[in-house]
Amino acid sequence: MPDAPLFEIDDLHASTPATDAAAGFEILRGVSLTLNTGEIHALIGPTGSGKSTLAAVLAGSPYYEVTSGRIRFRGDDITDWSPDVRAKAGLFLAFQHPEETAGVSLLNFLHQAVTARNGVEVSVSEVRLSLLAWMEKLQIEPALLERHLNGAFSAGEMQRNELLQMALLDPDMVILEEPAAGLDNETVRAVAAGLQTIRAESPALGALAITSDRRLPEQLQPDHCHVLAEGRIVASAGPEPVAGPATDDKEGLT
Ligand SMILES: Nc1ncnc2c1ncn2[C@@H]1O[C@H](COP(=O)(O)OP(=O)(O)O)[C@@H](O)[C@H]1O
Ligand SMILES: [Mg+2]
């Protein structure tokens, strides 16, 4: 469907799983938004509004139950697709689980990820070359390349690692969950600038940044800003951050 929006969430409802003892608890209560090719949207909301649940459901987490509504990616209904199939189709979920893959170097990790995304074996030296090129563009120290992925990565290093993954995997749509969490202002700026660098090379890339931290929308200057409260989008607006219900505001950047 060439004319379909890049990414569409249509009246999405999701609950925690029902058990024998209790019904599921509805967390998402009708979330809708439409994101077109090349657009960047921010979705902000306070703690408990359903942000992590939304990110998990968009990634295809089997934990939450989608009770109604659809998710569409380039016109395809992906609501029932597995996380792997979504990823292979070009949907990338960043920052959600800065996963620890102990003992694997960043290079090897990315080699595996790129090979999985492309569906064919890509050589390590090819991945190394494009990594080095991206590290320069994103102003990341080459030393990170040989570091092993483990708990010793700082929050800022994890974000840079995510940016590199994003750049190399070349997704069509990226969903960022709490990309500013635990970062100082300088690193928030670096993450926003890194995302813009990647978008400059891939102008069709769509991005949805899900965050409780207003510093990120301030830096990213999204095309649209949505406010999530109690599992629903209660306000949407153009580039200006919306004055909505309180978020977990950190001090703004000056
Ligand atoms: N697995 C779960 N079981 C029960 N309640 C949950 C579960 N996950 C989330 N919730 C509840 O759903 C609401 C939204 O949670 P969450 O998606 O984590 O919000 P946010 O990321 O915006 O802080 C909260 O009230 C939370 O307590
Ligand atoms: Mg959360």
Image (cartoon, rainbow, N blue to C red):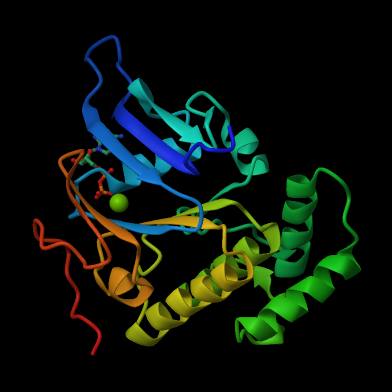
Question: Which residue is found at the position 24% from the left and 69% from the top?
Answer: 214
Comparing 43 with 128, the one in front is 43
- Considering every residue shown, the one lying at the far bottom of the view is 254
152 sits to left or right of 106: left
- x then y, percent, for residue 189: 40, 82
- x then y, percent, for residue 211: 30, 59
- Considering every residue shown, the one lying at the far front of the view is 3
Question: Which residue is found at the position 61% from the left and 87% from the top?
Answer: 139
Q: Quadrant of residue 182?
A: bottom left
Q: Work out whether 47 lies above or below 159.
A: above
Question: Which residue is found at the position 47% from the left and 41% from the top?
Answer: 5
182 sits to left or right of 50: right
Visible residue check, residue 148: yes
Question: Which residue is found at the position 72% from the left and 60% from the top?
Answer: 109
- x then y, percent, for residue 116: 76, 46
Comparing 19 with 56, the one in front is 56
The quadrant of the rendering that contains the N terminus is: top right
Q: Work out whether 71 lies above or below 22.
A: below
Visible residue check, residue 152: no
**Quadrant assignment for ligand 1:** top left
